[in-house]
Amino acid sequence: MSQDSHDPRDIPILTEEAEKSASLASLDVKAVHAALVTETLNLADSLLHRAAKDIDAALFERVFDQLRAQLPELVDRVLREHAAVGGTPAVASGTQAAASGTPETNTDN
């Protein structure tokens, strides 16, 4: 059979196909298995690292959005508390609010 041109009338001879199969049979199965396992683990590691970075970025954005949303109210509340006391720092009431876990100080949404 000519390698240069393919004639549709050429029928492969069984011995030619057997020679091709023999080269596959001479593969070291353990080496192929080890290579497949190694490549699979490398791919999984790469995908997991990428997913962890995506999750980290999403969580950072979520926390930053919550901070952006809650910070103005927090500043207003603290300014009102201090203004209500008449300029005297309200350390005791701020400590009590923090100790009681009021919704204003709880950020676990």
Image: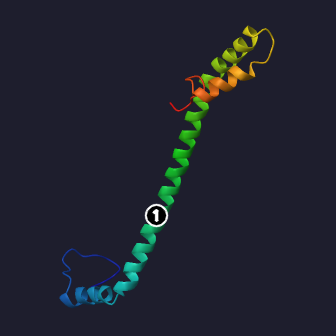
Quarter occupied by residue 93: top right
Q: Nearer the viewer, residue 28 or 75?
A: 75
Q: Amino acid at mark 1?
A: Leu
Q: Is residue 1 above or below residue 89?
A: below
Write the residue at 45% across / 70% down: 39
Write the residue at 45% across / 68% down: 41
Would residue 108 be found to the left or right of residue 77 on screen?
Answer: left
Label 1: how many Cα within 10 Å (few below 14, some 14–19, many 20+): few
Would residue 108 be found to the left or right of residue 94 on screen?
Answer: left
Point out residue 36 in the picture as x, y percentages from the top left corner.
40, 74
Write the residue at 74% across / 18% down: 90
Would residue 75 be found to the left or right of residue 69 on screen?
Answer: right
Point out residue 92 in the picture as x, y percentages from the top left corner.
72, 22
Point out residue 2 in the picture as x, y percentages from the top left corner.
30, 83
Would residue 76 be found to the left or right of residue 104 on screen?
Answer: right
Q: Is residue 80 above or below residue 69?
A: above
Q: Which residue is mark 1?
A: 43
- Please identify the residue farthest to the right as the structure is shown: 87
Quarter occupied by residue 91: top right
Q: Secondary structure at mark 1?
A: helix
Point out residue 98 in the picture as x, y percentages from the top left corner.
63, 27
Write the residue at 61% across / 32% down: 64
Q: Nearer the viewer, residue 74 or 58?
A: 74
